[in-house]
Image (cartoon, rainbow, N blue to C red):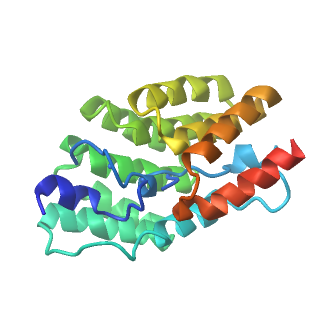
Amino acid sequence: MNHKSQTFTIICFLIAIAPPITCAEPDTNKSDLLVTTPTEAQQKVSAPGTVTIEQEQYNMLSAVNSNRRFIKPAPSLQLQTTARSLIKRKQYKQAISLLVSSPDLQKDWEKNYWLGTAYLLTRQLAKATQVLDHALKLKGNIPEIWIQRAIIEQEKGNANNALKLLAVAQNIDPESAAAFLNAGYAYEQLAETENAHAAYNHFLKLTTNDLHWASTRQHILLRLYNL
């Protein structure tokens, strides 16, 4: 397995939500990077039974372990792998402490991605924004980073800003299910029901027969029913 494959055989089941997923180009296995589920702001317009962002991120990260290949990682990659594992176990503060101690943090977009995700999951939105913006400066063609930034805007109630960021992610990867999923949430925040329906239905189309998205698909089908 080459270095590119090692990096992206992290916790990915494609992507993811989130984000919640992605150290070369993330062509496959991207979902584990993303927090792609109803956040605190999104839940205000959600149907009954909506899970929290922490619950869904945990579920998404847990779903991807069965197909991982293990090799002995380099120290920097080992730190990153440990941090991801801590996030999966909801030990966000420990993950943050570990990542901020990394000597190459300022040069590594992926560590900044995971640090931003941990800040997001602990509702430290200002820090999450700063770190993810730095990740974008290091690697601006990764759709998952744009999606995480969009989720921060959704948390702040800035649905229009979120949609602009999601449009960038969709332009980079037109088949990003997470981008369309979160667009649906943003349109729903804006009470744009027709656009929300279109985004959710496109998400469902992209994830047809994808077992990794099964629980999220059920949630969205319920959400569509109640719109």
* Above or below, comparing residue 103 to residue 73 in the picture: above
Q: Is residue 227 left or right of residue 115?
A: right
Out of 82 and 163, give the one closest to the viewer: 163
Image coordinates of residue 13 in percent, x first then y, are 42, 62
**Which residue: 76% across, 52% down?**
221
Image coordinates of residue 56 in percent, x first then y, are 61, 62
Image coordinates of residue 146 in percent, x first then y, are 45, 34
Out of 123 and 35, give the one closest to the viewer: 35
Out of 131 and 33, give the one closest to the viewer: 33
Q: Is residue 206 left or right of residue 184?
A: left
* Above or below, comparing residue 79 to residue 53 in the picture: below
Instruction: Residue lying at the far right in this picture: please name it.
Output: 226
Instruction: Residue lying at the far front in this picture: please name it.
Output: 209
Out of 161 and 210, give the one closest to the viewer: 210
**Which residue: 72% across, 51% down?**
220
Q: Is residue 72 left or right of residue 66?
A: left
Q: Quadrant of residue 97?
A: bottom left
Image coordinates of residue 34 in percent, x first then y, are 48, 51
Q: Is residue 152 visible?
A: no
**Which residue: 22% across, 46% down?**
108
* Above or below, comparing residue 204 to residue 162 in the picture: below
Q: Quadrant of the C terminus?
A: top right
Q: Is residue 53 visible?
A: yes
Q: Quadrant of the N terminus?
A: bottom left
